[in-house]
Amino acid sequence: MRVSRPESAIVLGILLAIFSIIGSVAYALYLKRIESMIRSDFSALEEACLAFKKEYGQLPTLYGDYFDFQYGLPQDVSNLEIMNALISRDGSGNESYSLNTNKTVFIEVPPSGLMLSGLNMEGEFVDPWGNDYQVVLDTDGNNVCAMENTPYPPAIGKAVAIWSKGPDGQLYSFDDVLGWE
């Protein structure tokens, strides 16, 4: 039996539809796995910052008091300074262990890898796409993370607000993953 051209076009169309559905489902599951990894990072980083505050009476930063401070802006300070204090590393933000004088390790973060979050070569905590996490610390102590110069409303009831730039790597875009929502 020979299949006519219209029938083979229908079969090909059905096969393409099936592969398209399978690909869409696989991509959705992949994004769900990545978001779960990111949210786990948010939780660990927030817990480490709060444990630091419990031990030292302040969040792991040299900045603030009168305003909340955001780490990760391209023209500003990366989250490296927070990470140096939290993982007990001498360096920017924790020079000569000035913030973490007891040299306590508050968080252990593995190196980042292909589609794995972690510490990059510079020591910044990055998401699975290699973008540094954005962090706002409530350094003025009013239990609100003010999101100055961002499109986001304040994170009320939070001492630490964290987000990922998402797969596009752009700040304040539709695919950002927000840790306080």
Image (cartoon, grey):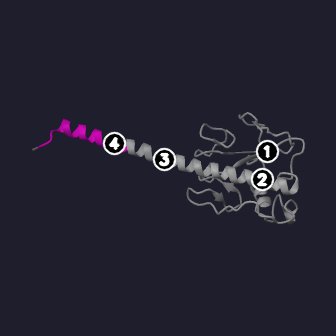
Q: Magenta residues?
A: 2-19
Could you classify mark 3 by the number of other residues whose Cα lies within 10 Å: few (under 14), some (14-19), or many (20 or more)?
A: few
Q: Which of marks 4 and 2 is in front?
A: 2
- Residue at 87% across, 56% down: 56
Which comes before the other along the chain, label 1 or label 2?
A: 2
Disc 3 residue type? Leu
Tell me, yes or no, whether the two marked residues, 4 and 2, touch with CB atoms within 8 Å.
no
Q: Give the number of the disc on residue 18.
A: 4
- Give the labeled residue for mark 3: 29
Disc 4 residue type? Ile
Disc 1 residue type? Ala
Q: Nearer the viewer, mark 3 or mark 4?
A: 3
The reply to whether the magenta stretch includes residue 11 is yes
Instruction: Place residue 171 in its image quadrant.
Output: top right
Tally the numbered discs. 4
Could you classify mark 4 by the number of other residues whose Cα lies within 10 Å: few (under 14), some (14-19), or many (20 or more)?
A: few
Q: What element carries label 3?
A: helix
- Give the labeled residue for mark 2: 49
Give the percent coordinates (x, y) of residue 111.
64, 63
Tell me, yes or no, whether the two marked residues, 1 and 2, touch with CB atoms within 8 Å.
yes
Q: How far apart are marks 4 and 1 (CA)?
A: 47 Å
Q: Give the number of the disc on residue 159.
A: 1
Q: What element carries label 2?
A: helix
